[in-house]
Image (spheres, rainbow, N blue to C red):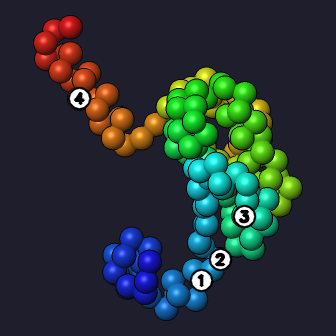
Amino acid sequence: RGAASTTRATRFGQRPFLDLYQKAHEETLTIIQIEQAEALDEVEKIAAIDGVDVLFVGPLDLSVSLGIPQQFEHPDFVAALRRVSEAAAAHGKAAGFLTMNPVHVTAWRGMGYTFLAFGSDGGMVSQGMRTAVDVLRGS
């Protein structure tokens, strides 16, 4: 993201820029998103790239690209997940995902996914607001 010296990475200017510059290669986590069917065709090559740390599945985008929107138990989707996790494991990378459903955490962790994201900031804010409205309405 450039060489700005007052970013979050430098604690907004509190960390000496040269310290960040000299250590960035050791402290940078590279996450490649696998969200298109075309990425599945290249997942082995992507996993083999030096410097890639995580192959991260965006399940909604991937399911849409596969033509099976939100069908996260569909055999084609499950096969895609396995393909990503196997490619990651074969190249010493982590496999990751984002989910909104706690059931998927257990199932996908069982496939070898270790880099886990649950929910989204927008979804959590929305849920919090719905809860607040329910409380205010006395529901």
Return the residue at label 4: 129
- Quadrant where the C terminus sits is top left
In front: label 3 or label 1? 3
Give the Cα distance between marks 1 and 4. 41 Å
Q: Secondary structure at mark 3?
A: helix
For the point 78% across and 45% down, the residue is 83
Q: Are marks 1 and 2 in contact (CB under 8 Å)?
A: yes
Q: CA distance from mark 1 to mark 2?
A: 5 Å
- Dot 3 surroundings within 10 Å: few (below 14), some, or many (20 or more)? some
Farthest residue toward the bottom? 18
The residue that label 1 is drawn on is 23
Label 1 amino acid? Lys
Q: In front: 19, or 79?
A: 79
Do callouts 1 and 4 mark residues in contact (Cβ within 8 Å)? Answer: no
Q: Is residue 120 left or right of residue 91?
A: left
Q: CA distance from mark 3 to mark 1?
A: 24 Å
Q: Position of residue 7 (x, y in %)?
A: 36, 76
> Label for residue 89?
none
Q: Regarding mark 2 in the picture, which secondary structure is present there?
A: helix
The amino acid beneath tag 3 is Ile
The vertical placement of 21 against 52, above or below, is below
Q: Which residue is mark 3?
A: 46
